[in-house]
Image (spheres, grey):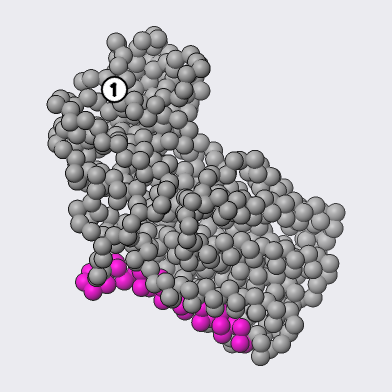
Amino acid sequence: MSSPVGFATERHLDVREDIERGAEPFQRIVAAVGELGPDEALVLHVPFEPLPLYKVLGARGFAHRAERRAPGDWWIWFYRQAPASTSAPAAPSAAIAPPIPGDQGVIRLDVRGMEPPWPMVRALEALERLGPRGRLEVLHDRRPLFLYPQLDERGFCHATDEPEPGLVRIAIWREASQA
Amino acid sequence: MIPLPTRGVASPPSVTLPLAYLGSAATAFVLAALSLPALGAELTGHYYQPRLLALVHVVALGWITLAILGASYQLIPVAIERPLWSERLARWQLGALVAGIVGMISHFWTGRWAGLAWAAALVGAGALAHVVNVALTLRAVARWTFTARCLALGLAGLALTVGFGITLAVTHGRDVFPGGVLAAVQAHFHVALLGWIAPMILGVAARVYPMFLLAPEPDGRGARIQLWGLGLGVPALAAGLLLGRVTLLVPGAAAVAVALAVHATWVIHFARRRKRPAVDSGLRFALTGTAYLVPGAALGFLLALGGRPRVAMAYAIVALGGWVSFTIVGMMLKIVPFLVWYRVYAPRAGREPVPMLAQLSWPSAERLAYGLLTGGTLALALAVTAGVRPAITASATAFAAGAVAFAAALGRTLLHLLPGPGRRPVPAPLPAEPR
């Protein structure tokens, strides 16, 4: 499986069974990220997106990328943030989804500043026109919680990140086109 | 230990749950409005009368509280990006709340106090379930935004209001409050209005108004003033009323006034800097509701100077019937069409032409409701202050007609949930809102 963040070494930690039997995996996760080197990433396997964990590990200097591979199967990459520099924040064009063989390119859709439900309508219309190996990247003001179930029902994978404050980016591609 | 959420963010927020609450709330609003013309005699007298107590509780519990709960179940997942802790619990608590509210109102209306405490306890159980449900939802929140803090403040206010109300019901007829029963009733009213309802409006407005008006988010400088103003002002104001201490009452009222003034400044800022050229009925109602803070503050000032009971009633009409009700009516005219659209048309979006939200509404009924409700409320407040019964009946009738028009507009939107004629026609989509 290719890394969406391009690290030489990835350490995998699957805590789905811990959570299923009611055990608290937090200490294991903290210990695992504490051992990461500058060019390494921890790939955490969880049954849901662990939003509170982002804040906790973010305060300790770790960035993340999230990807929903299937219902109940989330992969979260944690890696050490680069030292602060004078460069601009991450450009929205940086890839957040895994590469697709025979990639037909990325369609970018900016729905910021639209009143609901226009962002959802525009995204779903664009997905209907998406090629089998294409990818849609939606730029949004907020996490579109009402869009995600529609994507699930239509068989799309999606990954969401927030490259800069106030900008949410959702990458969407067909399940069948996954590498 | 970090509490991890028990469900994924992809869980769809429920559509039927908020609709059940909002439908119950709208029913209570229409019933309260229809009873107004028959209460002309009571409205020329003192506010502490059985039927007026019944009316206030239909409005405060049946209309406002159920509407806030329903809107919360739609907006909380959006505002804090977490699903509700338990939708099943929220469904059960609706039954408890409706049964308790009906029981309380029946006892107030007939002036029979035996059993009131039991009905109030049922409402308390429902409110407690909501507090637990939202508190456990907030436990998983990733970012403590202004809206999330307002929700937490409102939960504390709800718990205090209900606890206070149950205490009033249990101790009815006994002289247990230092300032007397009327002082306790006033304190109860203000804890409900400013401790429970106000934080919810302030929190939701900060998150939702920019989204609907296509306006920039607030810069956050006024957030602390609003939170501290309510957080410190409401307990001081309530304690001042309860104990008859002006040294608590005046600074408490001043702190609340500053908080509400900053909120109004934010709303004006949203309206002035909006990218959306036209304002629909829902937003017009919400913005008008904010404008009603001005006469509400003026009447509150008169009341603090020792205004008569009729001034207190006018104050309640402007605050509950104007500021709060118009805000809720406006939000319902935005939320209900979205929920119906999402339920019926979202699965078809992108695959076939689907109507937009504006095409699910009934603009002429909404305009009629706006004219009758806003005019009726102002006229009713003036008529009650003057104590002129024919004017009270006429303005109350106008208000009731406005409530029926509002219900008709909502009903037409809800018809889309029915299979068949209710969903037709499906016109071509409107062009997207301008950026």
Residue at x-position 49% and y-position 61%: B279
Between B74 and A3, which is closer to the camera in this rendering?
Answer: A3
Does any portion of residue B171 appear in the rendered image?
A: no
- Across and down, in percent, residue B123 comes to 53, 63
- Residue on which the image places disc 1: A4
Residue at x-position 39% and y-position 72%: B362
As drawn, is B143 to the left or to the right of B380? Answer: left
| Label 1 environment density (alpha carbons within 10 Å; few <14, some 14–19, many ≥20) | some
The answer to if B215 sits in the magenta stretch is: no
As drawn, is B50 to the left or to the right of A55? Answer: right
- As shown in the figure, which amino acid type bears the numbered disc 1? Pro
As drawn, is B264 to the left or to the right of B9? Answer: right
Give the magenta range. B393-422
The answer to if B398 sits in the magenta stretch is: yes
Principal secondary structure, stretch drawn in magenta: helix
Residue at x-position 62% and y-position 80%: B51
Q: Is residue B367 above or below residue B85?
A: below
| Quadrant holding the N terminus of chain A | top left
- Across and down, in percent, residue B115 comes to 57, 73
Q: Could you tell me which chain the residue with mark 1 belongs to?
A: A
Between A27 and A173, which is closer to the camera in this rendering?
Answer: A173
Between B74 and B160, which is closer to the camera in this rendering?
Answer: B74
| Quadrant holding the C terminus of chain A | top left
- Across and down, in percent, residue B54 comes to 60, 76
Residue at x-position 31% and y-position 26%: A95
Does any portion of residue A40 appear in the rendered image?
A: yes
- Across and down, in percent, residue A59 comes to 51, 23
- Name the secondary structure under disc 1: loop
As drawn, is A49 to the left or to the right of B36? Answer: left
